[in-house]
């Protein structure tokens, strides 16, 4: 069986260039980065994607292939399917981000593109929130996650409300997220997003309501917090290890999912606290490596590089 099936669009990150005011395009985006990060950890992956019909889109495809990622849908679109993140550094060296989305730039998958046999033949199915909007295209992601749950696959979802709010309708996008939560086994979200989506009841109540097995709440430089089986435990971290826009969050989650699979996960019921802790520790190393290399797809670690970290 295929280890990992990723659903989503390609995303472009703009990071500061060598001169003031200049920006360099680097491969980025949760679905692409998670798939490549997992492939570099030694598990097979599949990416269901659409990319822009330009040199950069073709570069993205080549990076995926070089790292053993099978591209299930390869649509070169004249209107590039991208999100742009304009990144600046303030005086303290912290990053600040302004996210914009090009008109009509949404995931161009239809329900017909999601084949049941591909979903059923995967152990882990992962989706990012950039593939889930209030538009009709979100139906493809919803269909894939429903199929995955129906086939007993382990479903992973990376929530990022900045992607969800591109059309300004938070309520509609939040409703789309809540529709897929009953299918999700492992959910990644930030502290701010936990407050937005869980309210006063908190994460444990949300998990019970939707049947989510594990939630990882990222806390920036304070690391992360994990909720599982009625317990809560902290994951030590270093500055920016779980900041998605640097690529580190994607390296973190790609390493986490690959460690789950290599550790023996075949179905949701295989998730144990011991396996979860090991996978989170490994993902943390992958995220830290990415931070040290200044983020982006080119710095996602190989298994040998991650295992060499103390």
Image: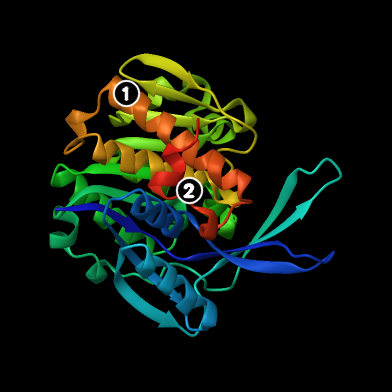
Query: In the displayed structure, would residue 131 be above or below residue 244?
Result: below
Horizontal side of 214 relative to 57 (left or right) equals left
Horizontal side of 307 relative to 222 (left or right) equals left
Where is residue 204 shown, x and y percent of the image? 40, 20
Q: Measure the C-alpha gap from mark 1 to mark 2.
A: 26 Å
Local SS, label 1: helix
Q: Residues within 10 Å of mark 1 (few under 14, many from 20)?
A: few
Name the colouring of the figure.
Answer: rainbow
Local SS, label 2: helix
The residue that mark 1 highlights is: 208
Nearer the observer, 172 or 216: 216
Residue at 38 percent across and 68 percent down: it is 66
Between marks 1 and 2 in the image, the one whose residue lies nearer the viewer: 2
Q: Residues within 10 Å of mark 2 (few under 14, many from 20)?
A: many
What's the mark number on residue 281? Answer: none
Nearer the observer, 194 or 154: 154
Query: In the displayed structure, would residue 214 be above or below residue 114?
Result: above
Where is residue 263 shown, x and y percent of the image? 25, 34
Residue at 35 percent across and 27 percent down: it is 278
């Amino acid at each position: 069986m295929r280890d990992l099936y990723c659903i989503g669009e390609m995303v472009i990150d703009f990071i500061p260039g060598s001169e003031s005011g200049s920006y360099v395009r680097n491969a980025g985006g949760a679905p692409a980065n998670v798939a490549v990060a997992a492939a570099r950890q030694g598990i097979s992956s599949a990416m269901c994607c659409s990319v822009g019909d330009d040199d950069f889109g073709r570069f993205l495809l080549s990076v995926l292939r070089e790292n053993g990622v099978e591209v299930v849908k390869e649509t070169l679109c004249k209107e590039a399917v991208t999100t742009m993140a304009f990144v600046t550094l303030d005086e303290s060296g912290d990053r600040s981000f302004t996210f914009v989305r090009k008109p009509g730039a949404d995931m161009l998958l239809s329900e017909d593109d999601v084949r049941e046999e591909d979903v059923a033949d995967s152990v882990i199915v992962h989706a990012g929130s950039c593939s889930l909007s209030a538009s009709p295209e979100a139906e493809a992601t919803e269909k894939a996650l429903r199929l995955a749950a129906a086939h007993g696959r382990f479903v992973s979802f990376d929530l990022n409300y900045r992607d969800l709010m591109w059309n300004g309708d938070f309520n509609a996008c939040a409703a789309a997220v809540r529709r897929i939560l009953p299918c999700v086994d492992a959910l990644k979200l930030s502290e701010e997003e936990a407050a937005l989506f869980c309210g006063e009841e908190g994460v444990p109540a949300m998990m019970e309501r939707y049947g989510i097995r594990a939630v990882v709440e990222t806390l920036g430089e304070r690391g992360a917090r994990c909720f599982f089986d009625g317990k809560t435990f902290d994951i030590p971290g270093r500055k920016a290890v779980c900041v998605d826009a640097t690529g580190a969050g994607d390296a973190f989650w790609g390493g986490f999912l690959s460690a789950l699979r290599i550790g023996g996960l075949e179905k949701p019921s295989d998730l144990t606290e011991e396996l979860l802790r090991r996978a989170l520790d490994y993902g943390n190393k992958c995220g830290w490596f990415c931070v040290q290399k200044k983020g982006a797809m080119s710095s996602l670690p190989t298994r040998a590089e991650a295992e060499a970290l103390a």
